Image (cartoon, grey):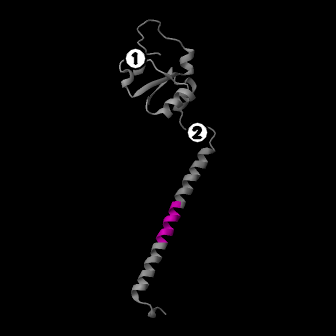
């Protein structure tokens, strides 16, 4: 039956068949990898306490980080981020920001924003002297 086909045509068919098999094998491997990842995600989502395997984190969960304020730097030309942090998250321009300290003024391309945490609002200054230098604000 195959005597009527030229040899080059048969080789071409064999090559296409091998490519299709390789492609199918790759698809099966990708699917198996995806199923394995999905199984891990499902198992993680079923956990009541995902940090139960890490007892070190319980220490911080109990006592908190005792952080008094959160600070960040935002570029002045990034109006979206600046507006988001100022209006949505209610960050204020920090005293250490170049525009507030007067060292650079308008020449600086960034602002330092900060926001007090609940721990920072409840605890006042640990020291009442003037030696603070802005370390606690």
Q: Nearer the viewer, mark 1 or mark 2?
A: 1
Q: Residue at x 45, y 93 (%)?
A: 4
Q: CA distance from mark 1 to mark 2?
A: 44 Å
What secondary structure is found at the residue carrying circle 1?
helix
- The residue range painted magenta reads 21-30
Q: Is residue 120 visible?
A: yes
| 48 is higher (above) or lower (below) than 65 | below
Q: Residues within 10 Å of mark 2 (few under 14, many from 20)?
A: few
| 81 is higher (above) or lower (below) than 31 | above
| 3 is higher (above) or lower (below) than 131 | below
Label at residue 101 = 1
Looking at the image, residue 6 sits to the left or right of residue 44; the answer is left
Q: Residue at x 38, y 20 (%)?
A: 105
Residue at label 2? 50
Q: Main secondary structure of the magenta part?
A: helix
Q: Is residue 96 visible?
A: no
Give percent across and percent down for residue 39.
58, 52
Q: Residue at x 53, y 26 (%)?
A: 86
Looking at the image, residue 60 sits to the left or right of residue 110; the answer is right
Give percent across and percent down for residue 70.
49, 24
For residue 101, which quarter of the picture? Answer: top left
């Amino acid at each position: 039956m195959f005597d009527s086909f030229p040899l080059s045509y048969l080789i071409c068919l064999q090559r296409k068949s091998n490519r299709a098999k390789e492609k199918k094998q790759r698809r099966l491997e990708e699917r198996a990898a995806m199923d394995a990842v999905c199984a891990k995600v499902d198992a993680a989502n079923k956990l009541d306490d995902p940090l139960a395997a890490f007892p070190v984190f319980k220490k911080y969960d109990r006592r908190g980080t005792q952080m008094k304020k959160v600070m960040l730097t935002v570029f002045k030309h990034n109006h979206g981020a600046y507006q988001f942090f100022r209006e949505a998250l209610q960050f204020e321009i920090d005293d250490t920001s170049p525009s507030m300290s007067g060292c650079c003024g308008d020449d600086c391309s960034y602002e330092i924003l900060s926001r007090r945490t609940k721990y920072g609002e409840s605890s006042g200054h640990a020291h009442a002297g003037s030696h603070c230098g802005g370390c606690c604000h």
